[in-house]
Amino acid sequence: MSAKIIDGRHISEQLIEEMAQEVKERMAQGYKQPGLAVVLVGDDPASAIYVRNKIRSAEKAGMLSIVKRLDESCSQQALDDVVSELNERDDVHGILVQLPLPKHLSEERIINLIKPSKDVDGFHPMNAGLLSLGQATLIPCTPLGCLELLKREMGDISGKHAVVIGRSNIVGKPMARLLLLANCTVTVVHSKSVDPAKLCQQADILVAAVGVPELVTRDWVKSGAVVIDVGINAIEQEGKRKLVGDVNFNDVVDKCQAITPVPGGVGPMTIACLIKNTLIAATLSDN
Ligand code: NAP
């Protein structure tokens, strides 16, 4: 079997173009330009790249973009003040604080401080609760991007058995909730699960969000499964730095119906969904 390689980069570009059109139309109707503010604390190189890509995509979609940079050693109060100010600005519809934060700052406190209506990451407890109830408007970007890929690849996923590896608040849990809302039968595998390979072998849809390089090998994958690899792991191979997923791509590729590559699969979709959430937040704010 030759698997389809799902081109997340191309799909995300299409989505951003569609949103740019919508932004234009909204502005022509007299609405404000949608605005996304990204807060970056410190100078972690990976975080700086993520922020740059998010800002570029917001600009491609014709949105106002604002970056607030704070020093690595900034106080919790200084970070709180920046977020509180953004909460009040009516040209800012979405706020994202790039994670992880330096150890002395509380991620939980900052997630709780962002106004739920501007929480374009979908991490605020109110948005997490609404997702559990099936009433969410702002849904975490990575699982939302994975669902979009699955629907494009498979159409109706109702009744499929989906196995999600990982139960983090930002990927695994919201992914499992979205799949359940799409009427999948959902199994969540985590570090205490007994015989994860056997559980994964049952999956029509396998989503790996673990953070362990190439954990998923051929014997974990059912023939004809659709595999979504969320993992982004930097490893050293033959003296070179390389990004790999949580799935051993070469080992499983000819066993799947379709699979996302790393890089170029889920990563760009996460950004497209951030832009989508900003547009939703702007639309709901009605200004
Ligand atoms: P996380 O918070 O560290 O959670 C990892 C999850 O995997 C935990 O639930 C953990 O179980 C489980 N786990 C760890 N080892 C396991 C094993 N051997 N077998 C089964 N389950 C295991 O990570 P995360 O934030 O969800 O991120 C996961 C991966 O996705 C990372 O590589 C991250 O870089 C990547 N990521 C990518 C994007 C993107 O845009 N593509 C976005 C976010 C994250 P316990 O709960 O029992 O500890």
Image: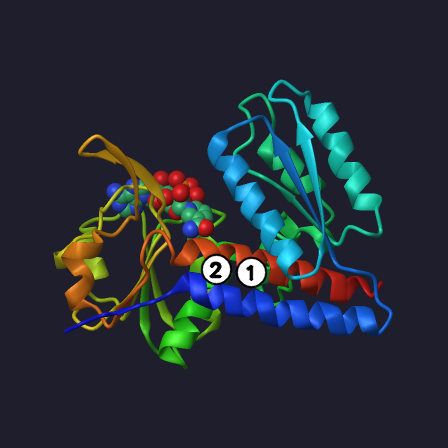
Colouring mode (rainbow / by chain / secondary structure / one colour): rainbow
Q: Residue furthest bottom?
A: 156
Name the residue that disc number 2 marks: 269
The x, y position of residue 39, in whole percent, is 66, 37
Mark 2 within 8 Å of ligand 1, using the beta carbon: yes
Question: Residue at image x 34%, y 67%?
Answer: 6
| Label 2 to label 1: alpha-carbon separation | 6 Å
The residue carrying pointer 2 sits among few (fewer than 14), some (14 to 19) or many (20 or more) residues within 10 Å by Cα, namely many
Asked if residue 215 is positioned above or below residue 46 in the image, the reply reads below
Residue 26, image quadrant: bottom right
Ligand 1 is in which quadrant of the figure? top left
- Figure check: 64 above or below 158: above
Q: How many marks?
A: 2
Q: Could you tell whether 103 is left or right of 194 in the image?
A: right
Q: Which disc, if any, is residue 4?
A: none
Residue that carries the numbered disc 1 in the rendered image: 273
Amino acid on which disc 1 is placed = Cys
Q: Which x, y percent locates residue 19? A: 63, 68
Q: Secondary structure at mark 1?
A: helix
Q: Which quarter of the rendered picture does the C terminus lie within?
A: bottom right
Q: Residue at x 36, y 51 (%)?
A: 263
